[in-house]
Image (cartoon, helix red, strand yellow):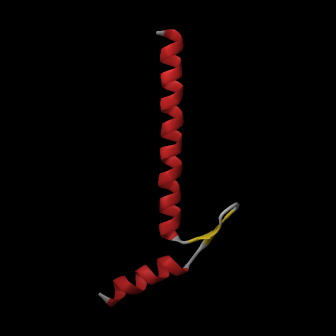
Amino acid sequence: MAAAKDAAFELAQNTVAHPRLGGLNALEWFQLVEMHYRHHLLQKKRLVDAWRQAYA
């Protein structure tokens, strides 16, 4: 149990630099990736909708 707490603490404390957002820990990186992925899925949906409207 203590090992899990130590690992969680390490994930929260260690950061890797992001060019615009500064240092992000592991949880923040995973949240950023998920948000970025949703952004691209929304872009794809808009493109597909526009294509269907133009060529339907």
Does residue 22 lie above or below 6 as drawn? Answer: above
Number of marks drawn: 0
Measuring 52% from the left and 44% from the top, which residue is drawn there? 39
Residue 5 appears at what percent x and percent y? 37, 85
Q: Residue furthest top?
A: 56
Q: Residue at x 48, y 16 (%)?
A: 52
Describe residue 49's horizontal placement relative to residue 1 as left or right. right
Q: In the orientation shown, which residue stands out farthest toward the left?
A: 1
Residue at 35% x, 87% y: name it: 3
The residue depicted at 53 percent of the width and 81 percent of the height is 13
Could you tell me residue 2's position as x and y percent?
A: 33, 90
The image position of residue 26, as x and y in percent, is 50, 69
- Residue 37 or residue 54, whichever sits in front: 54
Q: Nearer the viewer, residue 34 or 53?
A: 53
Residue 47 lies in what quarter of the image?
Answer: top right
Q: Quadrant of residue 20?
A: bottom right
Residue 22 horizontal/vertical position (percent): 67, 68
10 relative to 41, above or below: below
Q: Quadrant of the N terminus?
A: bottom left
